[in-house]
Each structure stands twice: as structure tokens, then as C-alpha cells.
């Protein structure tokens, strides 16, 4: 089947697969460094409690067979090692079947994590990574030419990401339609980056131009992905440029980098050769019949599964970031259908005072990514994902988002739980835990140029209300596993 092979996309496939492997590597490393406090045996939302409640058929995961923190760490490190090997080119050095098996193993390992990750893994880019990684397996390796059906499936995936995001905006918040959303977004986005302050202070007309350009790139350009070359390549490169703009303006984990990987898979080598020097292409072998049949079967499966996300795209009640099956294949995507006009932040504080009163000194816990200290410039963390910091943004919008885990988080601060403290940038009580911990809600704003020059402060804030009342360990002891070392805390008033 000559139509089946597209050797002119060998470079796009290479870049796509290496980028996806790099993002799998980051995903596994982020999981192993954060899981103990979030979903470990003594975590805020423990996996064993989840698997006891949710059966395997509703949430397929290796951890339904057995869970321990050691097993979870082994899965993460195995996935990281495999992803690093694929990133280094190992998949192109082994037989086609072995390369596909490696990609599918990456997918199974990460699917096992996502399906027990609960709210900590309820992000669209988790499903996007899984869907991209699954399709990467059926792109083959350097021994065969890129299969045309899978290249079209990747374009369909990119189309859903971009067009879905564009539709959710114009159907959602009025500010997308009157081109004013970026007057607020750079300041109120989940985790601003080091350039977000400067983006926020761009002139109003330029903000409107940004929004108009966004609508064009997300609603018009994706259609061009299905047109002949070089139009499809030009559309893909334009999407890449806009994603780089988003990377510069904020922290969105690996969403933007994964979108770039998908876009570059649609660029043919001749287009790249006009812009950059390109090495000699590999000489592919004819695709074996079993590979062709397998690719066609996956294409038929994806076509059938596309009914639900396609219907979602045309629905007036379009859903954002929805998985229609437990394997996270052929999902619906979208982002920022509504924009916050005001930024709220939850500030967590503790005190060593044994009794509360007007003169009590409260000290703040510092987070790695979310805004806190007024003079601290927001840092760049993406494509790494700080899960606690992201969920703190949601919790500030409404306590409903924090209800499953926020109390458990506070309880662990009251015992100086080492796994939880590793998620923070600074613990103001390094020697012994505080007697009381509370949380306050503040409104945060970017400062103006004059304030920045005179005070060095990037943020200014005003108190709103109490978010979580002062509590002692005794109040939340039921949220801390009994295996927590009791010597890690100091007795609260009234305790023996």
C-alpha cells in the first residue's frame, strides 16, 4: 500500500516522538517527587483509599493489583528510565515491534498514575500526554516511513486541542468576544511566570490584538491543517509560534510544549529544509503487513471514539477537558472558557504561640510557584508541574475545590510532615511544628511601574477574609495517619 507511507515526514515524526518522550520523562519525575504527600500511603488523598472505593474497571491501573509507596516509586523510576532511553534514540535502534512495545509501556505506566491521581491529576494535559503517547507508538520508528493514517490522527488531535479551545472561549466569557480578556488574564492566570508582569502592562490595544490573533489561530488556522502542503505546514508553524508566546507569558505545565510537538508532526521535511539545514533522511524499509493492519485497526478505533468529542465541539454546552473513556483516548480539550477578573490567593500561616490573642505573631509558609511574597518575581517552572500550587489557585477561587484535601494539608503542616514540606519553598518552623495554623484569603494585584521601581514589589495585596480558622493538631488529628511520627510535633495546649 504505497499510500500508507509518508517518508517526507520523517523529521516531524522524530521531533514529535522525542518531545513526547521528554514530557513523559518530566511527568514521571514530577510524580516521583510529589506523590508521597499527595497520594501516597500517608498522603492527603491516599491511593489505597481510592482503590478500595473505585473498582479496576472504572479506573484501570496497575495499582489496583498492589499499592505501596515503594511500588509507586518503582513505576515512576521505570517510566522515567524508559522515557529517557526513548528520548536518547533507543526506539530507533531496536526492531519496530520493540519500539512500539516501549511506547505502549510508557502509556500504561503513566495511565496507571493518572487513573489513581484523583484531583491532583485532573488536568487536560494529562489526557493529552496519554493520547499523544499512545499515537506515538503507532508512528513506528526509523525503520519504517511514517504511516499516513496516524499522521492524520495527530492532526485531528491538534485540531481538537486548538479549535476546542477557541470555541470554548467565544461561547464562554463575554471578554473573549469584546477582546478584553487579556486585560485580566496575565494577572489572574493560575501561575504567572517571570514575564507575566510585563505582559500584563502591555497597552490595551495590544491586548486586544493578542485576543484577536488568538481567535484567528484557534478558530481559522486549525482548519488549514487538513489542506495540502505547504499550507498545512504553515498553519502548524503559526500554531507553534503562538504556543511559544504562551510559554513566555505563563506557566501551563507541558500543555504548550505538547501542542508544539503535535504541530511539528504536521510539518513536512521540505518545508523545514527551506528554513533550516536538514540532515540526510534515513532509508526506511517497507512497513510489515502486521504493522499496517494494526495501524488501520487503531485508525478505525479512533474514528469510532471521535463521535463524542466531535459532538462536543458542535454542542452549545461544550465541555472542557473531558475524557469519554477510562483509557484517556480521543478526548475533548479546551482552556480558559472564562477569565477571572480578580486574583485571590490563600496565604497559609502558622504560629508557635500557645494562646491566641491580638499580639500573636504569624509566619507565612512560602510556596514554590504560586504568588506569596510581594517582592518575589514569579518563576518559570513549566513544563514541570507543581500540582499543589495549581490546586491552591483553584482553592482560592472557591473552598469547594479544596474541600477534599485542604484540611489534610493543614494537618500535615501541624506535624511538620517532611513529604508535605518538600512541596513548599520555605517552612517558617524548621525546628518544631507550629501550635496553630490558619489560612487567610487575600486579593493580589500586580504593582505598577512606579511601585516596582520604588519598592521592588511585584505584587500588592489586600486582606479579604479568613479562609480557614486557626486550628491545632488536636482539631485535625483524625486527618493525619497514625503512622506519622509523633515526635515530629509539639504538644498543643491541653495535650499530655
Image: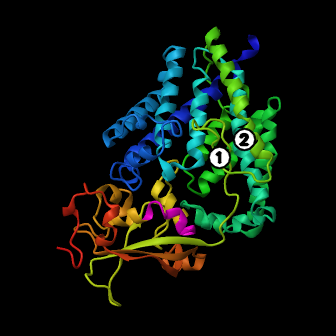
Identify the mark nearer the N-term, 1 or 2.
Answer: 2
SS at mark 2 in the image: helix
Q: Nearer the viewer, residue 453 or 230?
A: 230
Could you tell me if residue 412 is visible in this image?
no
Quarter of the figure that contains the C terminus: bottom left
Q: From what the image shows, is residue 361 above or below residue 369?
A: below
Crowding around mark 2 (Cα neighbors within 10 Å: few <14, some 14 to 19, many 20+) is many
Q: Position of residue 41 (x, y in %)?
A: 34, 48
Quarter of the figure that contains the N terminus: top right
Q: Is residue 398 magenta?
A: yes
Q: Position of residue 463 (x, y in %)?
A: 51, 81
Q: Is residue 444 magenta?
A: no
Is 68 positioned to the left or the right of 92 in the image?
Answer: left
Q: From what the image shows, is residue 187 above or below residue 297?
A: below
Q: Nearer the viewer, residue 7 or 156?
A: 156
Q: Which residue is mark 2?
A: 309
Quarter assignment of residue 420: bottom left
Is 214 positioned to the left or the right of 188 in the image?
Answer: right
Is 411 positioned to the left or the right of 448 in the image?
Answer: left
Is 317 positioned to the left or the right of 186 in the image?
Answer: right
Residue 139 circle label: none
Q: Position of residue 407 (x, y in %)?
A: 41, 66
Could you tell me if residue 2 is visible in this image?
yes
Measuring 46% from the left and 34% from the top, which residue is drawn there? 109
**Mark 1 and mark 2 residues within 8 Å of each other at the beta carbon:** yes
SS at mark 1 in the image: loop
The stretch in magenta equals 396-406
Q: Position of residue 323 (x, y in %)?
A: 63, 43
Label the magenta part by its dominant secondary structure.
Answer: helix
Q: Which residue is mark 1?
A: 322
Amino acid at each position: 500500500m504505497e499510500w500508507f507511507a509518508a517518508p517526507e515526514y520523517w523529521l516531524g515524526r522524530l521531533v514529535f516522538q522525542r518531545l513526547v518522550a521528554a514530557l513523559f520523562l518530566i511527568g514521571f519525575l514530577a510524580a516521583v517527587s510529589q506523590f508521597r504527600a499527595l497520594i501516597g500511603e500517608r498522603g492527603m488523598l491516599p491511593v489505597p483509599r481510592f482503590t478500595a472505593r473505585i473498582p479496576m474497571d472504572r479506573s484501570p491501573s496497575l495499582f489496583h493489583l498492589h499499592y505501596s509507596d515503594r511500588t509507586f516509586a518503582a513505576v515512576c523510576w521505570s517510566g522515567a528510565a524508559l522515557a529517557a532511553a526513548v528520548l536518547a534514540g533507543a526506539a530507533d535502534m531496536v526492531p519496530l515491534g520493540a519500539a512500539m512495545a516501549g511506547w505502549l509501556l510508557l502509556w500504561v505506566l503513566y495511565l496507571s498514575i493518572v487513573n489513581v491521581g484523583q484531583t491532583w491529576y485532573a488536568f487536560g494535559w494529562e489526557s493529552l500526554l496519554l493520547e499523544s503517547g499512545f499515537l506515538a507508538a503507532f508512528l513506528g520508528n526509523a525503520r519504517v516511513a511514517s504511516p499516513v493514517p496516524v499522521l492524520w490522527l495527530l492532526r485531528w488531535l491538534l485540531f481538537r486541542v486548538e479549535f476546542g479551545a477557541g470555541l470554548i472561549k467565544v461561547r464562554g466569557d463575554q471578554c473573549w468576544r469584546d477582546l478584553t480578556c487579556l486585560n485580566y488574564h496575565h494577572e489572574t492566570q493560575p501561575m504567572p511566570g517571570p514575564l507575566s508582569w510585563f505582559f500584563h502592562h502591555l497597552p490595551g490595544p495590544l491586548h486586544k490584538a493578542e485576543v484577536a490573533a488568538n481567535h484567528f489561530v484557534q478558530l481559522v488556522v486549525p482548519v488549514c491543517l487538513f489542506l495540502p502542503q505547504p499550507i498545512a505546514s504553515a498553519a502548524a508553524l503559526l500554531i507553534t509560534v503562538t504556543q511559544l508566546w504562551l510559554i513566555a507569558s505563563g506557566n501551563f505545565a507541558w500543555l504548550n510544549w505538547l501542542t508544539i510537538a503535535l504541530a511539528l508532526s504536521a510539518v513536512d521535511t521540505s518545508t523545514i529544509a527551506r528554513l533550516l539545514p536538514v540532515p540526510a533522511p534515513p532509508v526506511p524499509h517497507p512497513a510489515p503487513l502486521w504493522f499496517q493492519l494494526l495501524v488501520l485497526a487503531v485508525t478505525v478505533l479512533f474514528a469510532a471514539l471521535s463521535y463524542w468529542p466531535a459532538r462536543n465541539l458542535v454542542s452549545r454546552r461544550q465541555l472542557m477537558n473531558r475524557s469519554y473513556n477510562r483509557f484517556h483516548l480521543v478526548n475533548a480539550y479546551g482552556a480558559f472558557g472564562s477569565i477571572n477578573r480578580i486574583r485571590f490567593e490563600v496565604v497559609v500561616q502558622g504560629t508557635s504561640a500557645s494562646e491566641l490573642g491580638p499580639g500573636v505573631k504569624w509566619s507565612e509558609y512560602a510556596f514554590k510557584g504560586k504568588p506569596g511574597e510581594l517582592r518575589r518575581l514569579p518563576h518559570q517552572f513549566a513544563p514541570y508541574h507543581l500540582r499543589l500550587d495549581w490546586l491552591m489557585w483553584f482553592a482560592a477561587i472557591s473552598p469547594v475545590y479544596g474541600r477534599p484535601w485542604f484540611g489534610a494539608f493543614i494537618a500535615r503542616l501541624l506535624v511538620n510532615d517532611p513529604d508535605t514540606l518538600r512541596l513548599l519553598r520555605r517552612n517558617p518552623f524548621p525546628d518544631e511544628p507550629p501550635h496553630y495554623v490558619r489560612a487567610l484569603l487575600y486579593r493580589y494585584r500586580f504593582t505598577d511601574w512606579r511601585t516596582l521601581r520604588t519598592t521592588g514589589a511585584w505584587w500588592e495585596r489586600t486582606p479579604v477574609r479568613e479562609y480557614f480558622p486557626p486550628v491545632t493538631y488536636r482539631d485535625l488529628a483524625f486527618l493525619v495517619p497514625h503512622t506519622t511520627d509523633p515526635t515530629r510535633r509539639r504538644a498543643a495546649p491541653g495535650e499530655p
